[in-house]
Image (cartoon, rainbow, N blue to C red):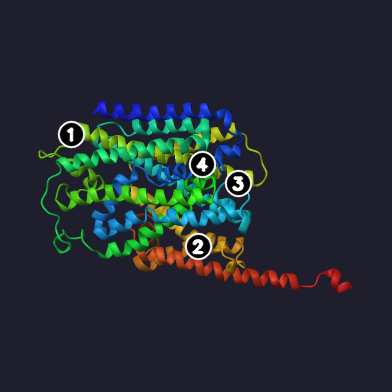
Amino acid sequence: MQVASAVVFAVEIAIGICAIAIYYFSKSKLNEDTEFFLTARNTQPWYRVGWGLFGSVMGAWVVFSVSAFALYGGGILGLAIYAIFCGIPLLLVGYIGSKLKTMLDRPISIASFASERYGKIFQVYVSLNVLFNLSIAMAVEYTSIGSLFVSFLDTPAYAPILVVGLVTMIYTMVGGLYVSILTDQLQAILTLLLVVVVSIFLAINFRVGPFPSIDQLPPGLGITEMGYESIVTIGLALVAATMFSDAVWQRVWAAQDNRALQKGVYFAAGLATVVAFFFGFGGYVAGVYGLIDLTDINQVNASFFGILKSSDGTVSAGILAVVALLTAVMNQSAIDSFQNAILDTILSVPMSLGISVPVNVARFVVVLINVPLMYLGTLGLSINSLFLVTNMLTTCTMLPLLMGLFPVFDFVGGTSAVLGSLLSLFAVMLHGYIAYGSWTDGIVNNFYAIYWWQPFIVGLVSSFVLTILFGLIERRLVYKIKKTPTSDTLMD
């Protein structure tokens, strides 16, 4: 399989070279300041916005995670909900993004809104949420591509991680968000072409009996309780993760106008749903027909490859190379999006304070943020468990942030938003203690091990209630301070 690995690496390097060439060809027409490097503000037509949003929410994770969730108990209902919620958050981004582009002067990060509405303390807290969310997402991408190459191409995990990390670092350092959006378009089109190739292969070669009815499906693969719960667990998780992804918000700032943004989000949401369902259903079918061992965690995580097997139980080198290339291209698109987004988030704080940040400093930060995450990707950690950590954190911060969009919550200030977010995390820990009988087990299960609907509801509802409660207290205190006579008034 070394030849397949070499082909994949060559394509990734070629994409990077093309990106740099296109950037230098367009360089004379571009603004070279740091703000443009981070936002490509108001330059992108709807189709580039759409390709970019698709690239920022898809990645190598989708080949493994969607089907694994269905086969671990989510069933066919959980699979459908997972695929749908890969697209729905982008529709919300379109609605909220249009409001933010009108409300804010020159936003750089979603934390720019937090700063404008709530002040610097909540801006820093939101920035930390975004950084953690994006770092986990990028570590998951490195983990996913490393696992693929180890399991199917007999290549050490560090090899694909180094290639994709270095290639994306180089063209991100050169052109920032603008060149990332250019590569998104190329990578997304190539992704869809490869999906078509794999679909044709399956149509020709995949031969099984009729699909069983719902009541004939193996245990845990039909309509399950976990499937119903996924409306909360997966729905909230993906919405919250998207709200705190500057990889998405950067495409919002880059859209030419709100019309381009709206068309782009519908385009991207449709593509994301279809591609997620394609990989998820493929792996699910492998489980239904017994093409993989459902008791083997490694086979379940890589279940999509089960439907590629020939009659002798092996996967041909040709189709394996195509799927590896498909996965690697999605991975590369996601990695460069996350690199730009993390950079954007880090630099948005000093820039909001009026501190000028040279472009070369921004380029150095790109390197700095990648090295530890590339190392983390070689450790082979659980993908869904990594996601759960950041999903719970962002769920507890989402409503305090979004409440700032609505005038009815004008009484909520920055202190209230921070306290509501932080104490809702404690509420999730307390729920874990009550549910499992110990603080350690409760924290591990609610934040890392188990996707359960109750902790998500506890985090969401408590953040809302506590933020309102602290907001009312804050307003009362401010009112009292304003009503307290000053010494000058008393002397008069």
The residue where tag 3 is placed is 349
Q: Of the two numbered discs 1 and 3 on the same chain, state the one appearing first in sequence.
A: 1
Residue 413 versus residue 57: which sits nearer the camera? 57
Q: Of the two numbered discs 4 and 1 on the same chain, state the one appearing first in sequence.
A: 4
For marks 3 and 4, give the CA distance.
Answer: 25 Å
For marks 2 and 1, give the CA distance.
Answer: 48 Å
Between tags 4 and 2, which lies in front?
A: 4
Answer with left or right where residue 277 lies relative to residue 263: left
Residue type at mark 3 is Val
Badge 1 marks a residue whose secondary structure is loop
Picture coordinates of residue 394 (x, y %)?
Answer: 46, 56
Picture coordinates of residue 417 (x, y %)?
Answer: 56, 62
Tags 2 and 1 touching, CB below 8 Å: no
Q: Is residue 223 visible?
A: yes
Answer with left or right where residue 58 lies relative to residue 77: right
The residue where tag 2 is placed is 399
Residue drawn where x is 38% and y is 69% of the image: 434
Residue 113 versus residue 199: which sits nearer the camera? 199
Residue drawn where x is 32% and y is 54% of the image: 83
Q: Which mark is residue 316?
A: 1
Answer with left or right where residue 70 lies relative to residue 171: left
Above or below for 305 versus 402:
above
For marks 3 and 2, give the CA distance.
Answer: 21 Å
Between tags 4 and 1, which lies in front?
A: 4
The residue where tag 4 is placed is 44
Between tags 1 and 3, which lies in front?
A: 1
